[in-house]
Amino acid sequence: MKMKTSRVVILMIIAILLAIYILFPFFLVLLNSFKNQAAIVQDPISAAGASFSQFVSNVNAVVNNKNFVFWRAFGSSALVTIISLFLLAVFGGMAAWVICRNKAKWSTAIYMIFISSMIIPFQVVMLPLIATFREVGKFVGLGMNGTLPGLIFAYCGFGGAMTVFILTGFIKGIPYELEEAAAIDGCSPEGTFFRIIFPLLKPTIVTVTILNGMWIWNDYLLPSILLGQSNPNKTLPVAVQAFVGSFVKSWDMILTAALLAMAPMIIIFLIAQKQIMNGMVEGAIK
């Protein structure tokens, strides 16, 4: 019993040290957002000089700065994130359902393609991606490269593999008899999915949506490549990077802008962390 207790204590100490190591950069950003430039330079770790009034002043200066265009970048990020998550949830659920309920070789092959695409780093395909988008845009008569629709299309492609992978594991645990009963009652395949299967996927869809949402909202590389630094519709991470370039020594502005960019996803994660864990556990068990 004593050995077991000491082991638990050691693991707790390691967990606390890891939490401090991971959260310390965020703590510095949060703390120094409440301070002015002089207080940050004097002692960035100390709470001396931090005040709520200074934080409000920093936020107003950042939001109203003409070089940042905060609300436009925020709107672009919100639009791209919301539409991408909706499409990933609906079409990812459809794909996972079809793969699970069809035991043919083609469904297994498609599933393995989804899985294999998860191990390919984005940096390997980012340059061919731009060329492909340019050609696809010419073929369909739409501007895919440098536009928000093109960015949404890219996120659906890159996020589809993980979405299908997680949802497939959950759908395997849903009794097939539910679908048979729906078919006997005259429900179409589309009705079976949206009335029976999709509501049952809610816990896992919440998990997938939040995981994809944090990635899409915080992503810098893909928007910077497809949209460019000078695009007026650039997303928030790209806008923050451009803003940092215009305020090289103004750490109060830089850290406040970084905090504003992180805040929405942090709030959502804190609110929905229970649903994330429940969805991941249920999908793993089933």
Image (cartoon, helix red, strand yellow):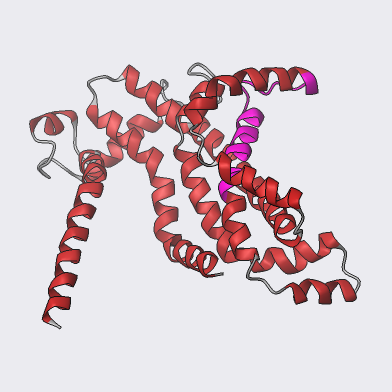
Magenta span includes 205: no
Q: Is residue 279 above or below residue 109?
A: below
Indicate the position of residue 77 as horizontal and vertical percent values: 53, 36
Q: Is residue 73 above or below residue 248?
A: below
Find residue 244 and report its image quarter: top left
Q: Which residues are magenta?
A: 139-162
Residue 50 or residue 241, whichever sits in front? 241
Q: Is residue 140 left or right of residue 252?
A: right
- Quadrant showing the N terminus: bottom left
Question: What residue is at 64 percent from the left and 66 percent from the top?
Answer: 172
Magenta stretch, main secondary structure, is: helix
Q: Is residue 194 above or below residue 250?
A: below
Image quadrant in which the C terminus is located:
bottom right
**Nearest the camera: 193 or 249?**
193
Q: Residue at x 69, y 46 (%)?
A: 110
Location of residue 55 in the rendering, given as x and y in whole percent from the top left corner: 26, 41
The image position of residue 285, as x and y in percent, is: 52, 70
